[in-house]
């Protein structure tokens, strides 16, 4: 399969599967336990129908939105995800460049493989820094200071990952960082030599945000040990409130799913929340972000910017979320599979397809701006 033959999420996923060794493909594609929540994230959109209006004279469509003080040319953004140079040697560089070209926001993870400073230089567009809460409070403050110095506008604290999810696909292949593959996993790498050549002929794989704490060569600690030993499971609302005050700017919590927690986020001064179940990778059996969206928007949408991610594969999915009141919609696997398949050209093609789908759907809905979308255009079965 060639990139020009990819027309949707499923095509990109198939192309990535052709290129990647099984353990790495399954790391992207997999989720927790029985993967019920992972499947539910996309299925939730299918229980909601669009009701279009016609003869509205929609010539031009304005897809721009403003979220957490950031002007985006598209109502979608590239959510921060870990280990991107494991999927393709360009990693976050490709995503930053593609997001910059399309005028939208992207994020660099604490477990990112390109430094947030370098990513900031690649794209002048809005950038978030996604980080985890560490037992070492000094490290938390150090990470925020580094982001501020780099010119990052938005801090995004992930709050649903105080322990790792039970990702059984990774257990079956022995996937871990650093690599500790079992025989089945090694065999899957052997049949995809192009990936290995690509991996070995480019710069050393590293985690620049955590160089002194997590080592890819087995020196300091593995990523699984990082989650179990360095992250603080006792993180509380008081801890986060202190971080919000310390940052003094746009501060977002990623992983909010209840109205009660959304209200607490408002109370401590957050400017944004992302409804998210981590792509189904943490608590299996949890509700989809889309299904929680309406009640949380109703509760706090007039006081805080509400976003969501999880399961988004189509422009119509984005329209449904925006119609319920989301300010913007995060993409994860939607851009990771094209990144793995073809690097920056893959991410750009995926974002362009999403742009075209949203624009076409807006015209068919009779809406010239995102603000014109509303619940009047939706029916739930």
Image: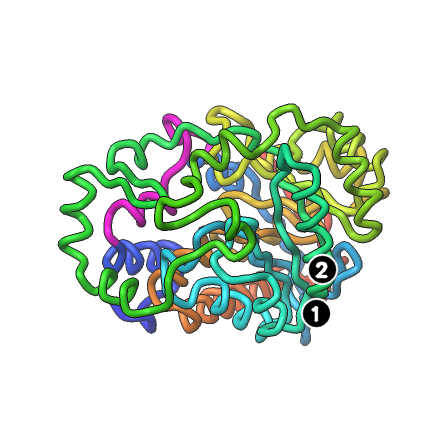
**Quarter where residue 287 is shown:** top right
- For this rendering, which residue is in front, 7 or 277? 277
From the viewer's side, name the closer residue of 196 and 334. Answer: 196
In the displayed structure, would residue 255 be above or below residue 82?
Answer: above
State whether residue 354 appears in this view.
Answer: yes
Instruction: Calculate the distance from the C-alpha at mark 1 to the C-alpha at mark 2.
Output: 7 Å
- Is residue 294 inside the magenta stretch? no
Q: Residues within 10 Å of mark 2 (few under 14, many from 20)?
A: many
Q: Please report contact status of discs 1 and 2: CB closer than 8 Å, yes or no.
A: yes
Residue 376 in sight in this render: no
Residue at x 45% of width, y 30% of height: 165
Q: Is residue 69 left or right of residue 74?
A: right
Disc 1 packing (10 Å; few <14; some 14–19; many ≥20):
some
Q: Secondary structure at mark 2?
A: helix
In the rendered image, which residue does mark 2 sit on?
370
- Which residue lies under the disc numbered 1? 62
Find the magenta span and give its range. Answer: 21-37
Location of the C terminus by quadrant is: top right
Precedes in sequence: disc 1 or disc 2: 1
Q: Is residue 149 left or right of residue 268?
A: left
Q: In the image, is 174 to the left or to the right of 224?
A: left
Asked which secondary structure carries label 1, the reply is: loop
């Amino acid at each position: 399969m060639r990139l020009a033959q990819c027309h949707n999420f499923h095509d990109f996923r198939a192309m990535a599967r052709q290129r990647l060794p099984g353990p790495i493909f399954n790391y992207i594609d997999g989720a927790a336990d029985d993967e019920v929540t992972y499947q539910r994230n996309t299925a939730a959109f299918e229980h909601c129908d669009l009701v279009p209006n016609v003869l509205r004279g929609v010539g031009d469509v304005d897809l721009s939105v403003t979220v957490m003080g950031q002007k985006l040319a598209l109502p979608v953004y590239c959510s921060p995800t870990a280990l991107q140079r494991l999927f393709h040697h360009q990693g976050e560089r490709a995503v930053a460049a593609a997001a910059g070209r399309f005028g939208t926001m992207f994020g660099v993870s604490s477990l990112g493989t390109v430094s947030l400073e370098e990513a900031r230089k690649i794209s002048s567009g809005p950038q978030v820094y996604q980080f985890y809460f560490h037992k070492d409070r000094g490290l938390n403050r150090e990470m925020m200071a580094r982001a501020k110095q780099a010119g990052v506008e938005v801090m995004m604290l992930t709050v649903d990952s105080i322990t790792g999810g039970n990702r059984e696909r990774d257990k079956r292949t022995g996937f871990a960082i650093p690599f500790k593959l079992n025989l089945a996993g090694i065999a899957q790498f052997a049949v995809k030599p192009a990936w290995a050549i690509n991996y070995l002929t480019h710069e050393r794989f590293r985690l620049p945000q955590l160089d002194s704490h997590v080592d890819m060569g087995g020196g300091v600690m593995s990523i699984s040990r990082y989650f179990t030993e360095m992250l603080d499971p006792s993180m509380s609302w008081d801890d986060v409130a202190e971080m919000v005050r310390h940052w003094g700017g746009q501060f977002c919590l990623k992983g909010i799913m209840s109205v009660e927690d959304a209200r607490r986020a408002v109370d401590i001064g957050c400017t944004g929340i992302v409804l998210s179940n981590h792509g189904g990778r943490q608590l299996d059996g949890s509700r989809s972000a889309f299904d929680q969206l309406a009640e949380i928007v109703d509760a706090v949408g007039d006081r805080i910017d509400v976003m969501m991610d999880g399961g988004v594969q189509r422009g119509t999915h984005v329209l449904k979320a925006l119609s319920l009141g989301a300010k913007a919609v995060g993409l994860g696997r939607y851009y990771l599979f094209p990144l793995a398949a073809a690097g920056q050209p893959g991410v750009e093609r995926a974002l362009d397809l999403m742009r075209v789908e949203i624009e076409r759907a807006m015209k068919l809905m009779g809406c010239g701006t995102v603000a014109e979308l509303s619940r009047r255009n939706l029916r739930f079965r």
